[in-house]
Amino acid sequence: MPPQSVDSTIELLNRADYVADRALATVVYLALRMGRPLFLEGEAGVGKTEVAKVLAQVLATPLVRLQCYEGLDVASAVYEWDYSRQMLEIRLAEAAGVTSRQALGHEIFSERFLLRRPLMQAIDFGAGPPPVLLIDELDRADEPFEAFLLELLSDFQVSVPELGVFKAPSPPVVVITSNRTREIHDAVKRRCLYHWIDYPDAERELEILRRKAPAAAATLARQVVAFVQRLRGLDLFKSPGIAETIDWCNAIVALDRAALDAPTADATLGALLKYQDDLGRIRGAEVTRILAELPAMAPA
């Protein structure tokens, strides 16, 4: 059942171990209450995709995910015909002596040969509850795909020339994410409720670690959060996201460390930073310097 207030939305997300601030919980609540798509932008690894996964979990409904990429087209995103099975059906019909092209054409262009891709799955979902449709990393797709998406978001229907129009009995819950590698057209954003997900503050990131890396000692969790918060203040090619913080903490736990030291930080930094230039800048003296500052920076 959808949440009845912003406070209940925060509680619902918390039960699924998603630690949301009030601003995010508010826009999630409004998207569900108003039936509007939710457009989430932010750096990679800040939890945009996780919002859709958590919503599917707490609403007890399927998650349908469309991963966007350059060259994404209707055949991959919406539907296509199962050509190999259609050809086999034609050969079997010919072998059986079927000569009516009209009857054969009607048969091979029936729903049993229709391959439903994510967008059609989210529209033609049958008698169950509306799914959560995740359109992930829309900024990776080409602009013409955005134009098609506009129609879908307006009417939640797909036209298949051979079969007719497939229309959603009720709109799915739509979550669109973007890492902002390029600007998304204003027309798409106008159809959505927009929210920018930023890196969390130290207190919220520590709470996330407590939930996602429960095996970490309290001292280690505080040190990891303080270290990562310090890194985000530096001019790195790619600052670590929440996902990297969790991975790094779990990597240190896997080495049976209860606290962070310079050799361990140096050895495991690849779980946190993903570019050689950033690794080269931080390893060694910079790691030692940041660690020396941690006692004054560590969250209470």
Image (cartoon, rainbow, N blue to C red):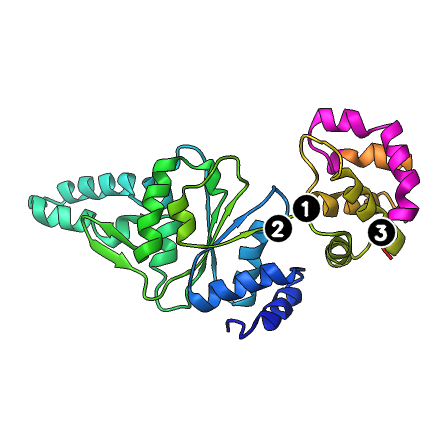
Q: Which mark is residue 222?
A: 3
Q: Earlier in the sequence, mark 3 or mark 1?
A: 3
Q: Earlier in the sequence, mark 2 or mark 1?
A: 2
Q: Amino acid at mark 3?
A: Arg
What is the x, y in percent for residue 216?
Answer: 83, 53
Taking the image as shown, residue 204 lies to the left or right of residue 175, namely: right
What is the x, y in percent for residue 115?
Answer: 32, 48
Secondary element under disc 1, as helix, strand or loop, is helix
Residue ID at (36%, 69%):
127
Whether label 2 touches label 1, CB < 8 Å: yes
Mark 1, Cα crowd under 10 Å, few <14 / some 14-19 / many 20+, is some
Instruction: State the residue position of label 1.
Output: 243
What is the x, y in percent for residue 209?
Answer: 76, 54
Q: Which mark is residue 49?
A: none
Secondary element under disc 2, as helix, strand or loop, is loop
The mark tally for this picture is 3
Q: Amino acid at mark 1?
A: Ala
Above or below: residue 70 compared with residue 218 = above
In 3D space, how far apart are the residues under numbered discs 2 and 3 (Cα atoms)?
20 Å
The reply to whether residue 251 is visible in this rendering is no
Q: Which mark is residue 47?
A: 2
In 3D space, how far apart are the residues under numbered discs 2 and 1 (Cα atoms)?
8 Å
Q: Magenta residues, as a range?
A: 270-298
